[in-house]
């Protein structure tokens, strides 16, 4: 029996259930309690957008994928890890960047809960089965997307960082809200961009873990892209200027990631996904 066909171990289930509870509390308080956040006004629309996407999409996606993953679904397991990765990124940025508030300990707890779940869950992911199921499919769209994303994110942040570095000043996105530095720069350039580049290399060489990380990163970027679009919506409502090319770029990337994610998940053999196969077979018997 492969690791994808046994229930998620109890510590990870408990960690995910606690994550669901704390995330629901954190986002609800952030959205519903007036003037809860103490951050600079320029940052508030971004925080509200992140909270909205997390509550409306992230929480239900984590709950549903956890249910199916625990029934032995490889598809559910992949989505569960991807959403957990999204929440890890989200609450790492909250813990390190948002102004101190009454939920600080909730943010730090969510960081270690999602880190524990993500690392442990990745260690148990059946990478060999994913590779076997998708071995006949072309990897070029996934490789091209991940490399393009790595290049675009790098260019986006370098366009702000390099001019400030050469002139001895601070990027406007850091200076205006009075931040010491940008956690988003650090997470994207220090973790996300290298992860996409390395995963694309592994996938191009048909390594099993290239398939595994591609699946998880596609889910993460789809949810994160939705969060960025929600942030943009709040920024527009707040009267802040948002460049049209940025909206088009993030909208396109989100749509492509959703399409590739769906294509990847549907390529998983139902026999490797007993929860879904069992559901289909049960419906057929009932008919």
Image (cartoon, rainbow, N blue to C red):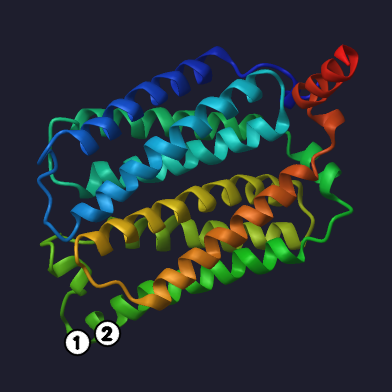
In the rendered image, residue 140, in percent from the top left (x then y), is placed at: 76, 66
The residue depicted at 33 percent of the width and 47 percent of the height is 50
Local packing at callout 1 (Cα closer than 10 Å; few below 14, some 14-19, many 20+) is few
Query: In which quadrant is the C terminus drawn?
Result: top right
The residue depicted at 65 percent of the width and 47 percent of the height is 215
Residue with the mark numbered 1: 167
Question: Residue 274's image quarter?
Answer: top right
Viewer-closest of 146 and 191: 146
Please report contact status of discs 1 and 2: CB closer than 8 Å, yes or no.
yes
Separation of residues labelled 1 and 2 (CA atoms):
6 Å
Viewer-closest of 56 and 177: 56
The residue depicted at 82 percent of the width and 61 percent of the height is 138
Q: Is residue 52 above or below residue 6?
A: below
The residue depicted at 69 percent of the width and 18 percent of the height is 71
Local packing at callout 2 (Cα closer than 10 Å; few below 14, some 14-19, many 20+) is few
In the rendered image, residue 267, in percent from the top left (x then y), is placed at: 80, 45
* Element class at badge 1: helix
Residue with the mark numbered 2: 163
> From the viewer's perspective, is 58 left or right of 38?
right
């Amino acid at each position: 029996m492969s690791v994808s066909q046994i229930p998620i171990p109890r510590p990870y289930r408990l960690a995910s259930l606690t994550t669901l509870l704390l995330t629901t509390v954190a986002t609800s308080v952030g959205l519903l309690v007036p003037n809860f956040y103490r951050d600079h006004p320029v940052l508030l629309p971004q925080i509200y957008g992140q909270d909205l996407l997390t509550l409306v999409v992230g929480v239900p996606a984590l709950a549903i994928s956890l249910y199916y993953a625990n029934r032995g679904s490889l598809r559910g397991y992949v989505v569960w890890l991807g959403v957990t990765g999204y929440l890890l990124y989200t609450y790492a940025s909250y813990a390190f960047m948002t102004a101190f508030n009454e939920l600080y300990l909730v943010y730090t707890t969510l960081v270690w809960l999602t880190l524990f779940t993500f690392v442990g869950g990745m260690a148990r992911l059946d990478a060999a089965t994913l590779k076997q199921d998708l071995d006949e499919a072309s990897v070029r769209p996934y490789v091209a997307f991940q490399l393009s994303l790595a290049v675009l994110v790098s260019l986006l942040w370098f366009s702000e960082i390099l001019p400030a570095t050469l002139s001895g000043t601070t990027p406007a996105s850091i200076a205006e809200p009075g931040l010491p530095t940008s956690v988003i720069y650090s997470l994207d350039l220090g973790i996300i961009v290298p992860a996409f580049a390395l995963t694309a290399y592994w996938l191009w060489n048909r390594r099993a873990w290239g398939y595994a990380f591609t699946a998880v990163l596609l889910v993460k970027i789809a949810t994160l892209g939705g969060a960025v679009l929600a942030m943009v919506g709040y920024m527009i409502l707040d009267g802040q200027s948002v460049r049209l090319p940025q909206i088009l770029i993030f909208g396109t990337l989100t749509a492509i990631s959703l399409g590739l994610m769906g294509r990847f998940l549907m390529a998983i053999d139902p026999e490797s996904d007993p929860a879904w196969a069992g559901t289909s077979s049960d419906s057929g018997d009932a008919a």
